[in-house]
């Protein structure tokens, strides 16, 4: 475990997305934790303390926008960079994502070649 590796949590209800993202980011020098839904994410967040969260928006139960609002409203998690990680990019969606507190947006499906670089740019 590299103590200097940036920590990223992937929150997505699709196991294949998590597997791919974890592999690509792991190979890119990140330390990655995964959660399949908001409840699991909230349980894992304090111990993992990620610098950045890749937030799927469409999830069963609490959706990604609601979870983002909660993270940004809490002093303990407000500093975490939240990147909406979604295939749903229609006109007006980015404004909605930003309104909920997302710091940026990465579209699915990911470009495997540039994904780690894209994520790293959001940490600057």
Image (cartoon, rainbow, N blue to C red):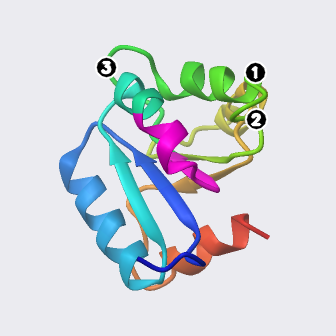
Report the residue at 41% width, 29% height from top: 43
Between 80 and 101, the one lying in front of the other is: 80
The residues colored magenta run 44-54
Asked if 61 appears above or below 67 in the picture, the reply is above
Front-lying residue, 7 or 10: 7
Question: Label 1's element?
Answer: helix
Task: Please say if the residues under marks 1 and 2 sit with CB atoms less than 8 Å apart.
Answer: yes
As drawn, which residue projects farthest toward the top? 61
Asked which quadrant contains residue 23, the reply is: bottom left
Measured as percent of width and height from the top left, residue 110 is found at 42, 66
* Disc on res. 73: 1
Give the crowd class for mark 2: few <14, some 14-19, many >=20 residues within 10 Å: some
Residue lying at 60% horizontally and 78% vertically, measured from the top left? 4
Label 3's element?
loop
Q: Earlier in the sequence, mark 1 or mark 3?
A: 3
Residue at (64, 34) in percent of width and height: 93
Tell me which label, 1 or 2, sits earlier in the chain: 1
Q: Earlier in the sequence, mark 3 or mark 2?
A: 3
Left/right placement of residue 76 relative to residue 17 reads right
Residue identified by numbered label 2? 78
For this view, does 27 lie left or right of residue 106? left
- Where residue 62 sits in the image (x, y, percent)? 43, 16
Q: Residue 47: give its label.
A: none
Q: Would residue 72 appear left or right of 87 to someone viewing this image?
A: right
The residue tagged with tag 2: helix, strand or loop? loop
Camera-near label (1 vs 3) is: 1
Instruction: Indicate yes or no whether the magenta region holds residue 32.
Output: no
Q: Position of residue 22 (x, y in %)?
A: 33, 65
The residue labelled by disc 3 is 60
Screen quadrant of the C terminus: bottom right
């Amino acid at each position: 475990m590299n103590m200097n590796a940036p920590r990223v949590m992937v929150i997505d209800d699709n196991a294949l997305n998590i597997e791919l993202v974890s592999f690509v980011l792991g190979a890119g020098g990140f330390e990655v934790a995964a959660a399949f839904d908001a409840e699991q994410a909230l349980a894992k967040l304090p111990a993992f303390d990620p610098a950045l969260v890749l937030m799927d928006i469409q999830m069963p139960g609490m959706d990604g926008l609601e979870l983002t609002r909660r993270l940004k409203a809490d002093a303990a998690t407000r500093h975490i960079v939240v990147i909406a990680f979604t295939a749903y990019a229609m006109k007006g969606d980015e404004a909605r994502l930003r309104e909920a507190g997302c710091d940026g947006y990465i579209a699915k499906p990911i470009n495997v070649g540039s994904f780690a670089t894209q994520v790293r740019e959001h940490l600057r």
